[in-house]
Every structure is written in structure tokens, then in C-alpha cells.
Image: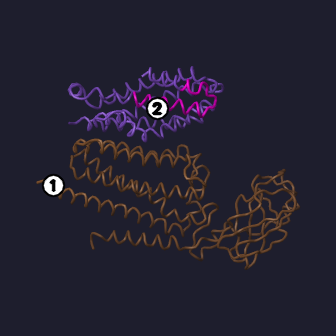
Amino acid sequence: MALYVVSTVYTCYLGVNQVTSIPVWNALFWIIVLFAAFNALSRSFQREEGGRQLYLHTLAHPRSVVLARTAYNAAVMIVLSLVSAATYSLFIGNSVMQDADLGLFITSVILGGIGLACSLTLIAAIAARAGSGIGLMAILGFPIVLPMLLAMLRASKLALDGVAWSVAGKYLIGLVAMDVLAVALAAILFPYLWRD
Amino acid sequence: MKHWWWKILATLLLLYVVVIGLRTPLAPALIACTPDRIAPGDVLVNVWGYNTRFQEGIDGSWISNDGQWVCVNAARVVSDDHVELRFNVPHGMRSEMSHLVLRTAAHGDLTYLNAFYTEDRGSGMSQQIADGCRPEALSKASIGSHEKTFQFPDRNILNESIRNLFFHVPMWFSMVVLMAIGVWKSIRVLGRNDPNDDRSALVAVQVGLLFGVFGLISGSLWARVTWETWWTTDPKLNGAAAGVLIYLAYLVLRGSVPEPAKRARLSAIYSIFAFTFMMLFFFVLPRLNAVDSLHPGNGGNPAFNTYDLDNGLRSVFYPACAGWILLGVWMYDLRSRAMRLQNILTDANDN
């Protein structure tokens, strides 16, 4: 996954060298993170078809499985989005970060990663059960994360513009609220998904 | 009769909406005004009205700026919907935007808000000019004075397109109601695995999606007329697009699982998950960043119900909502019955 991120960033670097406009920088960054998320999370249930799922079923309640999987995905996404942010600013240039509020930017990147993980875990499980790969996952997941993505874009753009926490705060609170909702729904619905 | 009274009701309501909603005239209003910026000195202002009868007489006109008033010097009626006004604009207007008030014999006071951008601003006109012509007893707004006849308000950029209120807004209400039926059926699928529930959920989503697409089309046309664009990044538009995309994805998911029982369960789970998020997009997110919304009631735009949705509009809008929702439920009912019959037929043919 890290390889995917680095190679995408490097492709962007070969294409554009340096990006100095904040909206373009921001948009490219979130496109990279979004596709990294779809790639990483679509695998989370793929390996568990057949015997392995049966084995897990005897060990744990499905609710604990989905919560654990969400936590693991969130951890993966935090690392992945931070790695993307680091390599991205290394290659594409951090001139846009001159008056950025770095703390706010990192927070919105981390919260964005967690948000993607929380809302896409159940989607990944559905796509894996449907037996098709990343294509279906992207179709099912994109509209769900679209408004979340807008909130992330806004929050990180405000951070890059160096706006105070109080302005961007409502987007971050909105993100957290959506995460809580998504995790709660996943915990309720996942047991039905597992029942065969 | 006992079972289909509500279908007659839906037909009558929609007939009422179409006839009354499209035939009722708009209240007289000022719709255009040139020039759009004024500087101190002699200014000739052309004002155009809609559904107005200026030829019955003009009793006065004022430019209002931050509570101070400038009187008209001369008014000449060109036609029933066109009048020429001559003002002597003094120095020192305080506020950026000036409003125009026209007192007509036929309709009372008509106001054109933010008619002029004021150039060469100062710290207020001299008291002498300002006190000289304050209009006595300005009636509040142009709408209030026409309660005698049944009319719709004529708002600044809306004009005749205000009638779209009876079509665009109820589309979304109907979509939400149909999707709620779909979720209810989906929950029943998870509970007891009846293929009939699965079929009903699918039909509810299909009909709801139809209403969603019509909502998008009518909204897009409305946006073209009022905001001069087919699509903007308005939070409500993003929410609506995400809502429609979610249910298109639902149909794709159904198409990619061949096994019926598994398909029923997977799509039920996705439908419940998606509906909750769609509610969030429709009703919570637009309020979260309401500042950038162009829709009425958001971002400093007055809501329809503060002064636009007067009793004339209300008396058509509420029947329109009820009528469209009932029509949606009717379509759902018909289609799920047809699907059930089709299913019985194919089963009979197979045996």
C-alpha cells in the first residue's frame, strides 16, 4: 500500500513537478488518499471467505469481529494517510504550507483517514460477500464517502489557508459524528451479513 | 371505494396543484431597474414592473439608503409596466446598497431591494435633504397589500419560476418517503427473509429513484433560471447527488449478486446503511455548512416561510406535497403488485 502511495505521488511529481495553488494541491492529495483507501480497505474481508470465516465465527461474536476490523482499518488508514501526506509534501512541494496551521492539517488528515476506514469497512464486507472486487466496492462506497470527502477537503483547505481551529472545527466535529454513526450501523448490521 | 379513496384524493390534489398552481397570477412587483449603480448628481432611472398597472397613477417614489430617503423629482409613466423616474442623488450616502420604493395608485408600495450599488459613499446625507421627504406610513412590503386577491408573490430572481416550488420540493419529500418504505421492507427482510419483502424494497427504491431524478431535473432547470447555472457546488446539491448515486449503487449491487437469498440480505444491509447516510446528507450536512448554500433558508437567504411562502403559496404547496407523495405510494403499490403477479406467472410456467 505504501508502494502504491509512493508510486502515485511520484507519477504526480513527474507530471506536474511543483504545485503552488492550494486548491489543486489539496484536491490531488485527497484523490491519492481516497484511492489508497479503496485499495487498502477492499482487501480487509477478501481473505476471509470460506474456511477462515467459519473459524472466526466459532471464535468470536461478529460484532467484535467488525469492531476489531474497523479499528485495524482505522490504524492502517492513519498510517497510510500520514505516509501520503509526508511523501506528497516531499515530492510535490510544501510551498503551500507556508501559512498553514500544521496541527490542524495533520488532525484533519488523521480524522479523514479514520472516517474513510469507519464508513468503508461495512461496504468492504458487503462487496466481499457479493464476491466482486474493488470495482463494486468503489461503486458502493463512493456516494457514501462523498459528503465526508467534501468535509475533509474543506477542513484541510482551511488548515492550509491558516484559518483558526474554531472555523474548521465544525467540519471535524461533523466527521467524527459521521464516524460514530457509521461504526454503530456496522455493529448492528454486520451480524446479519455473516449469518449463513 | 373503501380501498382506493386515496387514489382519487391523489388525483384530485395533483389536478388542483396543476390548475391552481399554474393559473394563479403573480402579485405585481418591480422586476428590473436601470442603471444598477448611482452616483451623486442627476439620475434617470427606468423601472420595469410585472403584472403592474402603473397607468393608474404613481403617487411617489423614494430611494432608501440606510434609513435615509431621497425623493423623486419627476415620474413619467411609459406603459403599465414601465416607468421613468428622475432623482437628484445627494452626496454622502452611507450604505453600499440602496433600495427603490415606488408608491402606485393600483398596488400600494412596491419595493425593489438592493436596486442600486451606491458610488461615492460618505457618512450620511445632510439632515435637511434626508428629513425633507420621509414617506409617511410606508406599508411594509408589496406582498402584504394584496390579500384581497389570491396571488403568488413575485420575488426578485424567482418571478414565474416560483411555481416550481410545487414540483421540485415535493419530489424530494416523495423520494424520502419511498426510500423509507424501502428501508422498512429491508428491515423486514433481515428479520424474516421473505422474498416478497425484498421485491417490495426493490420497487420502493426504483420508484423513489425516479422521483429523485425528476427532483434533480426540476432543480437543475430552476437553478438555470434563477442562479444562471445548471449545477453548482451547493451543499444541498451535493447531498442530492450523493443520495441518487447511493441508490444507483444499490441497483448495481443487486445486479452483481445472482443468488436471490444472498442478494436480498446484502442489498437490505446496504439499503439500511445508505438510507441513514442519505438522511444525514439531506437534512444534517446542509445545515452544517449552510453558509455556502444558495437555497432559501440557508446562508443568509431568507427561507420561503419567512415572507415568501404566503398563504397563497401554502394553500397549493401542502396539497402538492401530499399529492406527489400519494402518487409515489400509488406507483409503488401498482408496481409491486405487478411484480408479484409476474413472479407467480413465471413460477407457473416453470412448473
Which of B131 and A37 lies nearest the eye of the viewer? A37
Quarter of the image for residue B56 reads bottom right
Magenta-highlighted residues: A12-39
Q: Which quadrant is the N terminus of chain A positioned in? A: top left
B117 left or right, relative to A22: right
Asked whether residue A32 is drawn in magenta, I would say yes
Q: Residues within 10 Å of mark 2 (few under 14, many from 20)?
A: many
Please determine if labels 1 and 2 lie on a single subunit.
no
Residue situated furthest left in the rendering: B351
Task: From the viewer's perspective, tell me whether residue A116 is left or right of residue A20.
Answer: left
Image quarter in which the C terminus of chain A is found? top left
Real-space CA distance between mark 1 and mark 2, rounded to the nearest whole angstrom: 45 Å
Q: In the figure, what tint was chain A given?
A: purple
Residue B347, label in figure? 1
Residue sitting at 59 percent across and 27 percent down?
A16
Q: Chain of mark 2?
A: A
Residue B292: % across, % down:
59, 46
Residue drawn at point x = 61 percent, y = 65 percent: B159
Q: Is residue A32 above or below residue A150?
A: above
User: Of the residues tagged 1 and 2, which is closer to the observer?
Assistant: 1
Q: Amino acid at mark 1?
A: Asp
Q: Nearer the viewer, residue B83 or B278?
A: B83
Numbered disc 2: secondary structure:
helix
Residue beneath disc 2: A34
Q: Position of residue B115 (x, y in %)?
A: 73, 59
Q: Colour of chain B?
A: brown
Of all residues shown, which one is farthest toward the bottom? B56
- Residue B336 vs B76, above or below: the answer is above
